Amino acid sequence: MQMNDLPDARGHFGPYGGVFVAETLIGALDELRSQYDEARRDPAFRAEFERELKHYVGRPSPVYHAERWSRELGGAQIWLKREDLNHTGAHKVNNCIGQALLARRLGKPRVIAETGAGMHGVAAATVAARYGLECVVYMGSEDVRRQVQNVYRMKLLGATVVPVESGSKTLKDALNEAMRDWVTNVDTTFYIIGTVAGPHPYPMMVRDFQSVIGRECLVQMPEAAGRQPDVVIACVGGGSNAMGIFHPYVSHEQVELVGVEAAGEGIGTGRHAASLTAGRPGVLHGNRTYLLQDENGQIVETHSVSAGLDYPGVGPEHAWLKDSGRASYVTITDAEALAAFHACCRIEGIIPALESSHALAYAAKIATAMPKDRILLVNLSGRGDKDMATVAERSGLDFAAPAAATRS
Amino acid sequence: MNRIDATFARLRAEGRTALIPYITTGDPSLDGTLEVMRALVASGADAIELGVPFSDPMADGPVIQRASERALAKHVGLKDVLAVVRRFRERDRNTPVVLMGYANPVESMGVRDFADRAKDAGVDGALVVDYPPEEAADFAATLHERDLATIFLLAPTTPPSRIARVAALARGFVYYVSLRGVTGAAHLDTGDVARRLSEIRRHVKLPVGVGFGIRDAASARAVAAHADAVIIGARIIQEIENGPPDGAAERAGAWLATIRRALDAMPAKRAA
C-alpha cells in the first residue's frame, strides 16, 4: 500500500485514527464524510477553494532563502515557506476556507471552532465573516486570559467567544466543549476542527486542505533553489502545518521529514507537550494516537511557551509516520525556541510565531554541522505578532523603555 | 445466566420497568460511592451504572463533568472503580453493575486485563461511550468470552441499517439516548421516544433502556411506558452534590425512591 493512500475507508492510518465518538455524533460524521467525498471530486468546489486561496489568502506563499542566517550558521542553507504571510498570519486559514466552503455546501448556517492560542479561532471567525456564517469559538478560560488580543480580534470579526471553565481550561477542554455543542446543534452547525486530529474524516480532510503548502513547495523549490530540499522541518502540536508540508513529500523518499515537538521546560521535567516523543497510544477526541497520559489513562496537562503546541495529543497520521519511520520527531525546549525567535527577528527581519520558532530552532541546530550545499526547508507556519506579550515577559523586554535600551 | 439477563427476565415476568441509576465512582468519595450504591439498591434500583472518571468526558454535560472532576481530584481511576465493585459484591450478589466510561482508561489498562479484572470484581457489563461498534469488535469479543455484556448507545440520528449493526454486538441491553445533546440536557420529547423505540425493537431483541434527560417522576413515567429500563444520571448526581458528603447516600436514595414509587404505580405491562 502507498503511504499516501491512507487513511483507509474508516479513517485508519495503521492502528491510529478511526472514529472513536459517541453514537450521537456518528450521523453527523457520516454526512460530513460523504459530502466531503463528493466535494473533493467536484471540480467546481476545488476551483472555488483555489480561487479563495489566491485572492483572499494571498497564495501562493513564497519560499524564501534565509541567506544571512544560513551564512552565520556556516552550514546548510535554510529556506522558509512563508505561511506567516497569509491573510490572518498563519497556515490555519487554508483549512478554515475549505471547511467553511463545505459548511455552505451542507447548508449549515452556523460554524463552531475550538482554539488554543486563538489563531484557529481568528481564522474561523475570519472566514465566517467572509461567508456570512454565524460563528462560535470555544476557548479555555485560561487561554482567554493569556490571549486577550486574539479574543478581541475574534469579537471584531463578529464571532462569539465562549470561555470554557471545565478541566484544565485549555485547548483540549475547548475541543470537548465544541464537541458537546456540535452534538446538541448538529442539524444547523458545522464544526471546523483546526488540526489534523479528531474523528475521521477530519484528519484526512484538514491534511488535504493544508497540503497546498507542500504542493507549492514541490514546484517552488526547484525553481528557486534548483532542487527539492534534503530535509523538510515543521513544528508539531496537533500537526496540521507539518502534515500540510509533509504530505506531498511523503512519496519523495529522498526527502527527510522531521517534526519538532515542544519540549517545554525539558522532557525530564514533565512540563512539555511532546506526545510522540514521550507519550503512548490511546484514544482521545475521536481518534487513536499518541497521548500524554498518566498511569490511569487520564490525559495530563501540557506545557509549552507556544500555546499552539500546547496539546496532549497529535494527529493520527503523524503517529503512523513515526511508527513507520517515514518521518522522525524531535524536540526543542522553550529556551531554544525563544533563542531562534530572536535570531530570526534580528538576522532576517522576520518575526516568527513561537510555534514555528521550534522548527527554526531545530533547523539552526542541525544546519551548522552540515555541508553548505544541503538544503533545509522550514515551514514558517505563522507570524509572531500574537506572541509579543509572551516574548516580552520571557525576555525581560520592556516595551515602555527607549528602543536602544532593550537592544543589548 | 448473567445478572443483567436474569434481572430483565424477572422484571419482564412481573410486567415492571427497570430503574437504573448512574453515579460517578469517587463522588463524593470511594467509601461514599459504596454507600450510595447500597442506598440506591435499597430504594429500588434494579441495576447500577457506575461511571469511570475521565479527564475528557466529551459526551457528558456539566453535572457529570463536575462529578468526574471531583473524583479525579481524589485520583480515582479504573482500578479503584473495580475495587468498589468488589466491595459492593461482598454484600450484594444479585444487582447487576455496569461500568460506563471512555475508551482511554480501558486501553491504558489493556482490554484483556480490564476484562479479566472486571469479571473477577463482579462487574456484569460495560458501556464505553466512545467505542462505536465499528471500533469495538475486539473489545466486544474479549468481554463476551467472559460473559460480560457490551452495552451500546443508539441515538435519534441512528439510521435503521446501523441499528442492526449495533444490535449484532450488543449484549444485556441497548441504551437509547433520548435526545440530541449531552447527558443532563433538558428537552425530552417523549412522543419521539415512543416512535423511535418501536423502530428499534424491529431490529433489537434485547431490552431497550432510555436515558439522557430524565429528571423527575413525570418524565420517568412517560419513558417507562415504552422502555424496558429508565436510566437516570445527572439528576441523581445533583442530589449527591447538593449537600454534605456524609448525607449523599441518604439524599440519592430518597430521591430515587420517589421515582420507584411513580413507576410502581403504573399498571403492569403485559409480556410481549
Image (cartoon, coloured by chain):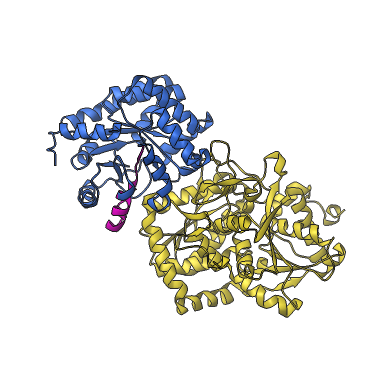
Chain colours: A yellow, B blue
Q: Residue furthest front?
A: B145
Residue stretch in magenta: B148-167
Q: From where the camera sits, is residue A94 visible?
A: no
Task: Say which of B48 and A159 sits in front.
Answer: B48
Q: Measured from the top left, where is residue A231 in percent x and y?
A: 73, 65
Count the marks: how many? Answer: 0
**Residue at left offset 57%, top offset 77%:** A55
Q: Quadrant of residue A33?
A: bottom left
Q: Measured from the top left, where is residue A28 in percent x and y?
A: 38, 58
Q: Measured from the top left, where is residue A34 in percent x and y?
A: 40, 66
**Residue at left offset 62%, top offset 44%:** A302
Relative to B155, say whether A375 is above or below. Answer: below
Task: Say which of B139 and B199 sits in front.
Answer: B139
Q: Quadrant of the N terminus of chain A?
A: bottom right
Task: Tell whether B229 sits left or right of A342.
Answer: left
Relative to A310, say whether B220 is above or below. Answer: above
Q: Measured from the top left, where is residue B29 in percent x and y?
A: 46, 25
**Residue at left offset 20%, top offset 27%:** B261
B237 in the magenta segment: no
Task: Tell whether A332 sits left or right of B49.
Answer: right
Task: Say which of A33 and B203 sits in front.
Answer: B203
Q: From where the camera sits, is residue A223 visible?
A: yes
Task: Say which of B217 and A241 sits in front.
Answer: A241
Q: Quadrant of residue B144?
A: top left
B165 in the magenta segment: yes
Task: Tell whether A217 sits left or right of B137.
Answer: right
